[in-house]
Amino acid sequence: MNMARLYQTGSIRKVKRASGIEVWEWRYRVKGKMRQQMFPVADFKTEKKLRKYLATSITELNRKQEEEPERIIKTIGGLIEKYRKEKLPNLAKSTRDTYESTFKAQIIPEWADKPISSLRPMAVDKWFSALEVSARTKAKALSLLKLLLDKAVYWEIISDRLNPLRLVEITGATKPVKPIVLLEPEQVTALISSLPEPYNIMVMIGSCLGLRVEEIAALQWDDFDFSEKTVRVQRAYTHGEVKEVKTVASLRGLPVPNMLCDALQKYRDSVTSPWLFPNARHLDRPRWMAIALQNHIQPIAEKIGLPHIGWHSLRHSYRSWLGSGKATLSEQKDLMGHSAIATTMNVYGGTKIEQMRPHVDAVADLLQPKQTSQSIQ
């Protein structure tokens, strides 16, 4: 005989979390299994106010008991949990890794148990003032908090139309963490001559074409047309994952100089993988370029007297050499694979002091007092 199912409202009790914050614990059953949700006491001063808030969920729970009612999200930790489940899996692995690192290191320890309403400009500014990390790390945390609030509006968890964290600014977030190292062509030539294969070929590609390191790692032999002396840059390898290039502008064809073509064709005989630089143990995937730099290229660079270099040193130097030649800014932008000329001008490369000297001297000549016939007498 079918018996009427009992109407349930669940039980509510006040508990204190390990962090010291008091919360209401709402417990109810779904298919005979106990479920629970937490709500900050700061948001609901009395049990009566919480039950009023839960009325819709309780009705839905009893109308269709075979399904768990949609979780009511009130804390930042709950918002992070929803974002991890619904949005994070769709992002590139490098982005997922960056977001997870920021969640675990900065956001969760401070904000997980706090209500979403606590994310206000003054509170976040105060937190940043006490946070002992770099400006760039703070900027990443702020960007992620803004993203979470935007999603909270989209999911109709909160009703704010304007994200309040847009009023928060991080000073110095765009400053380079390390000084830019620019190399002379002669220094790179000496480095290439001192390196064995395949590291000399890596450096040659970076300095002749100015590619990003993830683009160098992802090069395949089929990307090259040696008869036309061109290469098609169309993928990147980063965080152990092959993916699309950084932007639409990064998807580009480039001319390959004769010296690089000759070196690549000689090197090709020693490679049996479709990748230019395959992993030593797994020929079906690219090599880790960070290890190649640290264990092979940097020690040789130091030995021959070069400054401490990174992969981006080659790209910055390439832009500097382009700027001192006849390439227009538009051509430099396309060669670098930038979406905007502003990036080419303001971020990459630079001009060495000796290259600037003639221009400074020319201006000084204009300021020299002119000799007149009177002064000669």
Image (cartoon, rainbow, N blue to C red):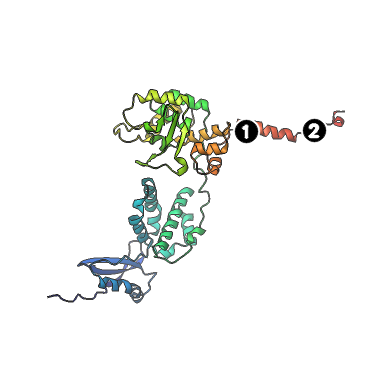
Q: Residue at position x 33%, y 32% from top?
A: 274
Q: Residue at position x 38%, y 61% from top?
A: 76
Q: Is residue 77 above or below residue 299?
A: below
Q: Quadrant of residue 233?
A: top left
Left or right: 14 as drawn, with respect to 2: right
Q: Determine whether label 2 and label 1 are within 8 Å by CB.
A: no
Rendered image: mark on residue 370: 2
Depth check, front residue: 76 or 260: 260
Q: Callout 1: 10 Å neighbours few (<14), some, many (20+)?
A: few
Residue 228 horizontal/vertical position (percent): 44, 28
Whether residue 269 is visible to the viewer of this picture, yes or no, is yes
Q: Which residue is mark 1?
A: 356
Residue 317 horizontal/vertical position (percent): 51, 33
Depth check, front residue: 41 or 175: 175
Q: Residue at position x 36%, y 25% from top?
A: 268
Q: Which element carries disc 1, helix, strand or loop?
A: helix
The amino acid marked with disc number 2 is: Lys
Q: Which element carries disc 2, helix, strand or loop?
A: loop
C-alpha separation, residue under disc 2 versus residue under disc 1: 24 Å
